[in-house]
Structures are given as structure tokens and as C-alpha cells.
Amino acid sequence: MPKQKVVYVCDKCGYESPKWFGRCPVCGEWNSAKEFKLKSTSVESISQEGLESTGNGKPIPRFFDLVSALREAEIKRTKVGIESLDTLLNGGIVPGQVILLGGEPGVGKSTLALQICDRVASENKRAYYVSGEESVQQVALRAKRLNISNPGIIISSETQIEKILDGIDVDKTALLVIDSIQTLSSEDIDSPVGGVVQIRAVVEKVRLFSKKYGIPSLLIAHVTKEGLIAGPKLVEHVVDTVIYFEGERTTDFRILRVQKNRYGPSGELTIFQMTHQGLEGLSEDSLITYTDAPGNVFTSVFEGLRPINVQIQALVSRVKMASGRRIAHGVDIRKVIIISAVLSKHLNLPLDFHDIYLNVSGGINVTDPGCELAIAGAIVSSFLDVYMGDTLMVGEVALDGSVRSALNLPKRVENAKSLKISTIVIPKASNLEWKSVAQDSTSKLIKVGHVRELFELIVERKDGQKN
């Protein structure tokens, strides 16, 4: 009988060591080492077995010439049938692709997975939906609520990955859904369900199965309080695509963002609305609200390969404390602190004695530096109590107060034509001319080179409103 292998695994980051450790050398956590005994078939042996075959069952050659590799790369994608989701996945699902779908409990992961199964399943192709958290009857009730009655969807509540994979008809399978990976276990691993070693073994077996038979897999995972994939984050490095649900769970809007994608660009996002019939795709402009209140400015940000129109909202309030607070939702708080310091320095504004609250409408998290000019405009607009809600601002703000051009500025302005705007503010450093973007537009194009010019523009708007 082969001797069992003992390993110590950090339950925070997944670091493995043959010896016990008090503090994890990777994440720095104390007392996070857990002892696990592996059977003769370990995760390493599973991976080694998977190296012996490819998706078509042929031996793997050690080297490929470039022409053969490019020929193999020309693969046909499977359309999901949900237009916004197909766009998010760069045209559809690739055969053998392993997708990890993460999000908080109740955000709509299972609902979206069941809708995808309904779209890809047909008379000749089946979609296997494995739910380790819910019974078959509970899944059926959700399908009834979503008005789904597709006989091509095969439901199971089995929790052992070996039995699941053995029961799949590989010739008639279009998609495999695991809901969720924390509830499945492998008979080769002697550790608790949901543990680090178990999750890695389950994901590795599903990955090898998908690559061998060319069957795409959708793995659902929960998100911890810190916003990371539970159990642990190392799962993201194994799969091909990682998709997160963003936005507030208390609203009807759901935002899907691609964090990683080996078959397309990362950073792409799409917007859904939760209805009684499931998730429905929406345009990003649906998150924008036209208002007469000061402190509202439109901007266009790049998330992935396409621009998205968002609304920056700022509230500047006088306080009696020694220094004001900076609170931001949807934007890095450090960006707000820096921009407010630049405005205080170069415009001589007493923002140090004011609270600044900043929000991006719709719950979208913006990382594009092209929104900095809009943030500055929203703060000044709220401070001076000036309406700027029909204005689009795009540009970066430097520490010396200068306004720099943003990447792909023509595409941003072109995408903003769908908005009801009267003024577009861009950096002077850009070579963009309005006639080259939209000749039939009635919007006014204004170029600014410094935050002082932005301030003068807003003051001029204020004088015009008084008259």
C-alpha cells in the first residue's frame, strides 16, 4: 500500500509546504497551515495524466511550428445567444474554455448560468447543470420561474467530481456548469469539502476534462468579504476566463466584468437588469440620469476595448472640522484626494475645509485615468453650485494642474453622441477637431489646457445661468 503524502497548505493563499510553517511566506498570515494527507493519486499525478493527451485524443508533440499553431488557433466560437454576453466573451465561448463566474451570494450567478444552459442546449446537444448546493427540485423551480423548459438541460445534485464526469455523454454535451466549486470533492483527496486542496483538485479535473473533449465549462464560485474568489484566489490562475459580478445587489442592475480572458481582451464589462424572467442585457446609457443638480458631469471611460459613458457625481459640503473628509464610490479614493489637492493648490479653493463625496452612477468601478477631468469638473461644479449636467469631460489631470489628453479620445467622443449633451470639454493637447468626429452634432467643443481654464469655464456658465 503506497504511503500517504502529508502536505501543509495555507488556507488563505494556497501555499504548499512539506513541512509545517508558523507564518506563510507568501501572504504573511500566522497559523494558517493546515495538514492534509493525499492519497496515491494526487493533484500532481492528475496533471501528469492530463499531459498525455490533447483535446482530440492525439499525443502531444513537444514542439509546434508557427503555421501549425496558427491553424490550430482558428477555432469556431459557440454563440451563447445573449448578445451582451457574447460581446463580453469576444464573440462567444471557445471549445474547451473554462470560465469562472464569481460574485456575492444572491447576485444572480445561478440564474445567469441556467439562462446560458437554456440557450446552448438543443435536441442534439445537452447542457449539464450540476448543483451541489440545491436539490434537483429547487433548480427546477428556478427554471419554472424563468419560464425555462428545455429537455436538453440535464440536472444533477451529485457532489463527487469523478461520478459527475463519468456520467457525461461527451459526444452530446455543449456545456458543463458546476454550481458551485466549493461544494464538490474528489475521491483522490483526503481533505474537507471546500478546502484549498479539494477545490484545486476539482478545478484541475474539470479543466483536463474540458480540454480533452473540447467541452466548455462554467464554474461558479462565491466571493469572500474581501471581494476575492473563495477558496482561494489561486483558482483564477487555472481557468481561462474570470468573470465577476459587480454593482449593488440591492438594485436591479448587475454588472459583469471580465477580469481575465485568454481568448479575448480583459476589462470588458456589460450591464444586465434582473427581471422576473431573469437577467436581460442593457445599454450602459441606462445607468445615466439627467438631472439639474450641480456636481453632475458625464465622461467616457475605456473598459477593455470599447468606451462606456458614465456619470460622475460630486458633493462638496462645508464642515467645521480642521480638515474635510474624502469618500468615493466607484473611483479610487487616492485619485479623489490628489485631484482635490491639485484644485486647492492651483485654484486657491478652500477644499481642505470641505467634505468631498464622489460617486459613479450605476455602481461601476472606474479605473481609467481619462475620467480625471470629469472628477475635477464635478467637484468645482458642486463647490460653485453650477449646473454642468449636460457636459461631457474627458482628460487626465497632472499634478501641475495641466490637462493631458486621454487615450482613444476620438472613440470616446464618438460614443458620447448618444447622450443629450450641449458641451464637450477635452484637453488642448489633443489634435481632435469636432468636425472630424460628428459634423451633424449641435454640441459645442471646448479645449482646456489647465484646471484654471476649467474653472473659468464653469464660472462663465454660472454667470450665464444668473442672466
Image: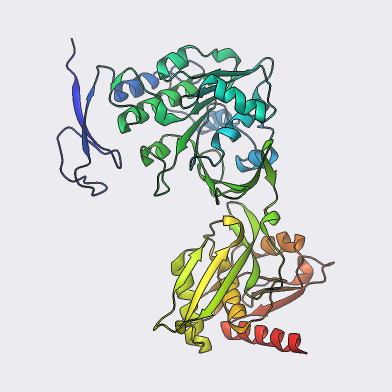
Is 321 situated left or right of 456 in this image? left
Return the residue nearer the eye: 138 or 43: 138
Return the residue nearer the eye: 15 or 280: 280
Q: Quadrant of the N terminus?
A: top left
Q: Is residue 247 above or below residue 456?
A: above
* Residue 69: percent from left, percent from top: 52, 31
Q: How is the image coloured?
A: rainbow
Residue at the limit of the structure toward the right, as seen here: 440
Q: Is residue 149 above or below residue 65?
A: above
* Residue 43: percent from left, percent from top: 31, 24
The residue under the point 54% across, 59% down is 366
Is 391 situated left or right of 210 in this image? right
Q: Is residue 157 above or below residue 336?
A: above
Q: Is residue 283 above or below residue 440?
A: above
Q: Quadrant of residue 424?
A: bottom right
Residue at the limit of the structure toward the top, as seen here: 1
The residue under the point 55% across, 24% down is 138
**Residue 117 can be seen, yes or no:** no
The residue under the point 69% across, 33% down is 81
The total of numbered circles placed on residues is 0
* Residue 455: percent from left, percent from top: 61, 84
Is 432 situated left or right of 449 in this image? right
Return the residue nearer the eye: 150 or 319: 319
Q: Quadrant of residue 114?
A: top right
Return the residue nearer the eye: 112 or 261: 112
**Residue 27 can be seen, yes or no:** yes
Q: Quadrant of the C terminus?
A: bottom right
